[in-house]
Image (cartoon, rainbow, N blue to C red):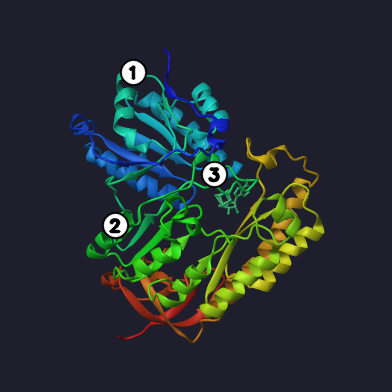
């Protein structure tokens, strides 16, 4: 049977940045879909960044509005969605594995709908492979989750593959229902897309043009979260420091932090930052606003100026250090974490040492470290690389050894101090321990079996530092 190809991905098209107005779509589900999922259940697998987690919360909201209920067990669900990540090849490998496992399930339950969405379908080669080799009913991208009920209906009716992947600028979806994963911590997407075009990165192609939500929509969402009892928000975007640039209203990310601080939310975090766009106003807001937490994830990628240039990062080692020093001056004790790529094409031993030097200079208290992964369609994918895989792995291990010390030091400095912890729940290993994150974003365990503390901010005296967490004793209030 012929597949229904409503639109197909196109990386060339995705590279364009047109001067078109961004469309804000106010979501309202057509009444004809309200019983679409009656008596049926859904499950969503989410991979990759927090942006995908936030998108999955919206898709869950849309599905529940259409009558579907959440299935705890993915094996029993009638609709299974895979919200995918394309940032590195190993993220994609996992998804091919899950798709392979689902093959058998479709044989057992012919009515099962399997959908693949998120960043992977935005790639031409991935979508071609999914259509060719996998038993998937629905393929849609990052710009059209608001079409989900219509796409499901098409899949039920046509009984063949329904594909809708848009490669244009993207839109802004407002007023969509959400099923949030936590009752005390919430994601708040403030902008979509990325215009940076770092040469190794696929995101500007899969997520479209940088586009900011209207500030009033964001402030309204946060006020509602405060009313619902939420304690912490994390503002999300690929480069939150560019917030507002596209709106032409002389209102920047720093202004947004000052305004959100007034909503009464206890804690504000944000991710991800681009060092070039991190400005003084944002740093001042971190100093002035009690709710903005003293932790910043500031991806550096490399400590070598030539590599940074070829990566198109638009800052130098020295400029990065100047921002770090300014931050430390304005927010004493701030904890800094980062992302680092090793083995970028033709990276020399000396260039790699510059990265190690920068890690030592900053004293990062955490880092996500990656081996460079070739992404088809990006400028770096065309570079001829002379570094062996073995050498890349050796460098990664050397880097991890250093960054692990940073994690430990970051916990050691709190031993003997009292820190404020937003309690998430019982610790994974049990033993009558509970856990949560401190203001500096340190995973903290403490002895207690009082479930009522979940969602509360408590004081904990730190007694022991480990590499991945700290341990303390609950203080009597
Ligand atoms: N290879 C390896 N790591 C990558 N990242 C982005 N693209 C690639 C790639 N092609 C990393 C960067 C970024 C993080 C989210 O993923 O460090 O900050
Ligand atoms: Fe990718 Fe660079 Fe944009 Fe981050 S800033 S999403 S690394 S292109």
Q: Earlier in the sequence, mark 1 or mark 2?
A: 1
Q: Residue 32 in the image: x percent, y percent?
A: 19, 29
Q: Residues within 10 Å of mark 3 (few under 14, many from 20)?
A: many
Can I make out residue 419 in this image?
Answer: yes
In which image quadrant can residue 103 be found? top left
Mark found first going from the N terminus, 3 or 1: 1
Q: Earlier in the sequence, mark 3 or mark 2?
A: 3
Distance (Cα) linking label 3 and label 2: 26 Å
- State left or right for residue 182 relative to residue 121: left
Which is more toward the observer, 25 or 127? 25
Where is residue 283? Give x, y as percent: 50, 71
In the figure, residue 325 lies in which quadrant?
bottom right
Mark 3 and mark 1: Cα distance apart in space? 32 Å
Name the residue nearer the viewer: 99 or 178: 178
Pointer 3 residue Cβ closer than 8 Å to ligand 2: yes
Res 432 visible: no
Which numbered marker is on residue 221? Answer: 2
For the residues labelled 1 and 2, say whether their Cβ atoms are less than 8 Å apart.
no
Q: Mark 1 = which residue? A: 158
- Residue tagged 3: 203
Picture quadrant of residue 37: top left
Disc 3 vs disc 1: which is toward the camera? 3
Residue ID at (34%, 40%): 43
């Amino acid at each position: 049977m012929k597949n229904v190809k409503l639109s197909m991905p196109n990386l060339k098209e995705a590279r364009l940045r047109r001067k078109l107005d961004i469309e804000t779509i106010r979501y309202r589900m057509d009444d004809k879909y309200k019983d679409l999922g009656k008596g049926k259940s859904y499950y969503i697998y989410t991979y990759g960044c927090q942006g995908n987690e936030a998108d999955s919360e919206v898709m869950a909201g849309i599905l529940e509005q259409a009558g579907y209920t959440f299935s705890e067990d993915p094996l029993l669900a009638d609709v299974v969605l895979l919200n995918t990540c394309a940032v590195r090849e190993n993220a994609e490998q996992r998804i091919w594995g899950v798709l392979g496992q689902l093959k058998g399930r479709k044989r057992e339950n012919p009515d099962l709908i399997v959908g693949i969405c998120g960043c992977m379908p935005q790639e031409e080669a991935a979508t071609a492979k999914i259509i060719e080799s996998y038993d998937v009913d629905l393929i849609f991208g990052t710009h059209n989750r608001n079409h989900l009920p219509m796409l499901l209906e098409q899949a039920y009716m046509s009984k063949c593959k329904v594909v809708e992947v848009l490669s244009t600028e993207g839109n802004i979806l407002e007023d969509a229902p959400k099923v949030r994963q936590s009752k005390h911590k919430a994601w708040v997407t403030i902008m979509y897309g990325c215009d940076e075009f770092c040469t190794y990165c696929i995101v500007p192609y899969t997520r479209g043009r940088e586009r900011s939500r209207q500030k009033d929509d964001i402030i309204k969402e946060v006020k509602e979260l405060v009313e619902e009892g939420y304690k912490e928000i994390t503002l999300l975007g690929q480069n939150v420091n560019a917030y507002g640039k596209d709106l032409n209203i002389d209102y920047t990310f720093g202004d947004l932090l000052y305004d959100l601080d007034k909503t009464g939310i206890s804690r504000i975090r944000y991710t991800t930052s681009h060092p070039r766009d991190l400005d003084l106003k944002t740093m001042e807001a971190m100093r002035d606003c009690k709710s903005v937490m003293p932790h910043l994830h500031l991806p550096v990628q490399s400590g070598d100026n030539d590599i940074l240039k070829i990566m198109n990062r638009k800052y130098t080692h020295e400029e990065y250090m100047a921002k770090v020093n300014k931050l430390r001056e304005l927010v004493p004790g701030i904890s800094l974490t980062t992302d680092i790529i090793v083995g970028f094409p033709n990276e020399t031993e000396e260039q790699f040492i510059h990265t190690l030097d920068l890690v030592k200079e900053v004293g990062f208290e955490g880092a996500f470290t990656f081996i460079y992964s070739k992404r088809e369609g990006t400028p770096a994918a065309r570079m001829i690389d002379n570094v062996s895989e073995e050498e890349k792995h050796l460098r990664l291990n050397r880097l991890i050894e250093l960054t692990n010390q940073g994690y430990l030091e970051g916990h050691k400095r709190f031993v003997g101090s009292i820190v404020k912890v937003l309690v998430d729940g019982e610790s994974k290993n049990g033993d009558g321990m509970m856990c949560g994150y401190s203001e500096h974003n340190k995973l903290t365990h403490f002895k207690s079996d009082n479930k009522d503390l979940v969602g509360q901010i408590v004081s904990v005296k730190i007694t022991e530092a480990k590499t991945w967490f700290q341990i303390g004793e609950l203080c009597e209030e």
